[in-house]
Amino acid sequence: QVQLVESGGGLVQAGDSLRLSCATSGRSFSNYAMGWFRQAPGKEREFVAGINWSGSSTYYADSVKGRFTISRDNAKDTVYLQMNSLKPEDMAVYYCARRTGSGTYYYAPSYDYWGQGTQVTVSS
């Protein structure tokens, strides 16, 4: 059984940084690409960042490019999202997800397993 557990969310001020972690269980974490999505109240879930199985390729939403960095440690079965220069519009529940292996990184149906989410609150 695959489980994804996010952590690291919290309340910060605009301009601060946070690092989210997503610990996974189940087999063959290193075989799968991973992604981070977020969902703000009243809005649809949106792609934030993605990373291929080895970490050699990364993908970002335009809204976070240059501020957020996705990375992974396959030895620890964990994927990270370093978030710098946070803005109030970054406030959302952040989810990590495992990509199925087909479909675009940017599309939620391309992912088959999801975590429960971690709240990020940014005050102005």
Image: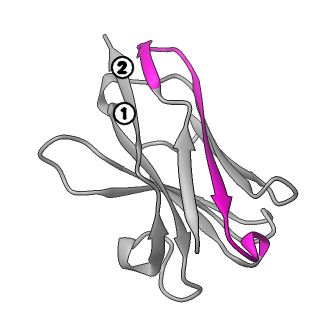
Secondary structure at badge 2 equals strand
User: Magenta stretch?
Assistant: 10-30
At label 2, which amino acid type do we have?
Val
Is residue 79 placed above or below 30 in the rendered structure? above
Furthest residue in direction bottom, as rendered: 102
Q: Nearer the viewer, residue 97 or 48?
A: 97
Furthest residue in direction right, as rendered: 75
* Label 2 close to label 1 by CB (< 8 Å): yes
Q: Which residue is mark 2?
A: 122
Q: Position of residue 68 (x, y in %)?
A: 58, 39
Decide if residue 52 is in sight here.
yes
Decide if residue 62 is in sight here.
no
At label 1, which amino acid type do we have?
Asp
| Side of 39 relative to 106 (left or right) | left
Whole-number angstrom distance, CA of label 2 to CA of label 1? 7 Å
Label of residue 78 in the image: none
Q: Position of residue 15 (x, y in %)?
A: 49, 14
Position of the N terminus by quadrant: bottom right
